[in-house]
Amino acid sequence: AQSVTQLGSHVSVSEGALVLLRCNYSSSVPPYLFWYVQYPNQGLQLLLKYTTGATLVKGINGFEAEFKKSETSFHLTKPSAHMSDAAEYFCAVNLRSGNEKLTFGTGTRLTIIP
Amino acid sequence: NAGVTQTPKFQVLKTGQSMTLQCAQDMNHNSMYWYRQDPGMGLRLIYYSASEGTTDKGEVPNGYNVSRLNKREFSLRLESAAPSQTSVYFCASSGVVWRLVSPDTQYFGPGTRLTVL
């Protein structure tokens, strides 16, 4: 069973427009949630994570995400896209099963249109 | 402080050849991981090691073996490479040993691009 689903393998937005990347999880217990970014020919780096506490999480480079338990979602947003945001973005979950394993979504490639 | 390093960066193998991918971290992390990344499939966990001397299978372990040589190093071996193992391989590490606390951030290496002909 797919634990994490990213809707849209490719998303294009104009420079200065809102960025919205979608992530939904399927788990009876709300998991720990992560967003990672991968720039071309590089490894992944953490943008932000939700573990406990405030459901609106702020990350690096102006990104934020909100954990919504009722919608089983953890969508990533940025108010104004910049050319440097072009990359692939991965949502990941830890299923609170007593280990540190992450399950990754299939990724969303973000293209910024000048 | 180099973080997570991987060697080699690129490799081409013929079917049936063997090779070892090397990974090292200098952050004194307990846990280390090997993933493979394939188009449209995200990252899938091959093996991980929660601490020195322990290893455990991930989602796609078949055709691979690992060695946690010491706290710093975690190697991935392909004994008899197959074209299906053509992929980009990432090593990662994290600091927290699971003790009912939230998982620590995983830090990734730059990857090894492997082609099996």
Image: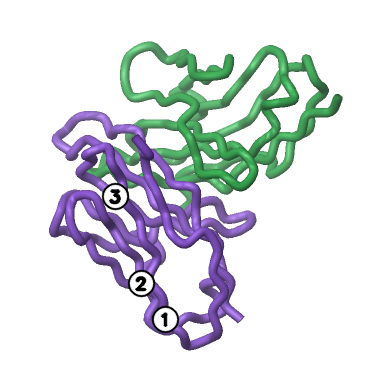
Q: Which mark is residue B69?
A: none
Q: Identify the residue shown where x is 38% and y is 56%.
A: B34
Residues packed near mark 1 inside 10 Å, few (<14), some (14 to 19) or many (20 plus): few
Q: Residue A56, image x and y in percent?
A: 47, 13
Residues packed near mark 3 inside 10 Å, few (<14), some (14 to 19) or many (20 plus): many
Quarter assignment of residue B6:
bottom left
Q: Which chain is green?
A: A
Q: Which amino acid, by three-letter code, is at mark 1? A: Ser
Mark 2 to mark 3 CA distance (whole Å): 15 Å
Please tell me whether mark 2 sits on a helix, a strand or a loop.
strand
Q: Which amino acid, by three-letter code, is at mark 3? A: Met
Q: Identify the residue shown where x is 18% and y is 50%.
A: B71
Please tell me which residue lies in front, B33 or A65. Answer: B33
Residue corresponding to mark 3: B32
Q: Chain of mark 1?
A: B
Residue corresponding to mark 1: B18
Same chain for the residues under marks 2 and 3 in the image: yes
Residue corresponding to mark 2: B77
Please tell me whether mark 3 sits on a helix, a strand or a loop.
strand
Using the image, determine if residue B70 lies above or below residue A83.
Answer: below
Task: Tell me the quarter of the image containing the C terminus of chain A.
Answer: top right
Q: Nearer the viewer, mark 1 or mark 3?
A: 1
